């Protein structure tokens, strides 16, 4: 349950929005048709506390995205974060159960 870290040594456009180079923690709020994805400037020791409550502080969110859900035919058993460059366009993907989201990433 550690917080997931995202780090870049270059400024990026994440889903068309400027994200300066740096280190962020990633947070998600999955919903049926959309997920909210937050890039947070704080570094946290853990993602949740002993009561399974998020340790995330929204005051440090640099970027909040609403990302549409893509249904999957196959079940993804474990929450999976990956980078996809199969089409020549880089994307950050997250998948879980029958759901996937795709966030385009380009250099700024």
Image (cartoon, rainbow, N blue to C red):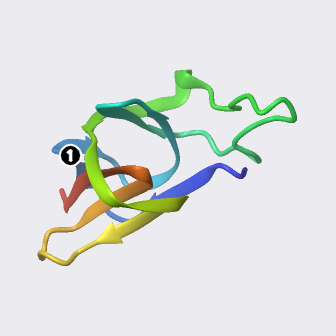
Where is residue 32? Give x, y as percent. Answer: 36, 31
Q: Nearer the viewer, residue 24 or 30?
A: 30
**Residue 25 in the figure: left or right of residue 67:** right
Q: Residue at x 25, y 62 (%)?
A: 91
Q: Residue at x 77, y 33 (%)?
A: 52
Quarter-wise, where is residue 58 in the image? top right
**Residue 54 in the figure: left or right of residue 26:** right
| Label 1, residues with CA under 10 Å away: few <14, some 14-19, many ≥20 | some
Q: As displayed, is residue 52 above or below residue 101?
A: above
Quarter-wise, where is residue 106 in the image? bottom left
Q: Residue at x 40, y 55 (%)?
A: 94
Q: Nearer the viewer, residue 91 or 9?
A: 91
Where is residue 84? Give x, y as percent. Answer: 28, 71
**Residue 62 in the figure: left or right of residue 70:** right
- What is the quadrant of the C terminus in the image? bottom left
Q: As displayed, is residue 89 above or below residue 102?
A: below
Q: Nearer the viewer, residue 70 or 9?
A: 70
Q: Mark 1 highlights which residue?
A: 15
**Residue 61 in the figure: left or right of residue 78:** left
- Residue 16 in view in this figure: yes
- Residue 64 in view in this figure: no
- Residue that sits furthest to the right in the current view: 50
Where is residue 10? Give x, y as percent. Answer: 32, 63
How many numbered badges does the structure rendering display? 1
Q: Residue at x 54, y 21 (%)?
A: 59
Quarter-wise, where is residue 43 in the image? top right
Report helix, strand or loop for mark 1.
loop
């Amino acid at each position: 349950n550690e917080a997931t870290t995202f780090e870049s040594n270059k400024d990026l456009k994440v889903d068309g929005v400027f994200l300066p180079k740096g280190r962020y923690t990633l947070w998600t709020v999955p919903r049926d048709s959309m997920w909210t994805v937050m890039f947070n400037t704080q570094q946290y020791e853990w993602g949740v506390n002993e009561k399974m409550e998020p340790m995330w502080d929204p005051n440090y969110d640099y970027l909040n995205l609403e990302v549409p859900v893509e249904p999957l035919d196959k079940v993804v058993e474990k929450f999976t974060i990956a980078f996809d460059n199969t089409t020549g366009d880089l994307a950050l993907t997250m998948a879980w159960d029958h759901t996937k989201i795709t966030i385009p990433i380009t250099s700024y």
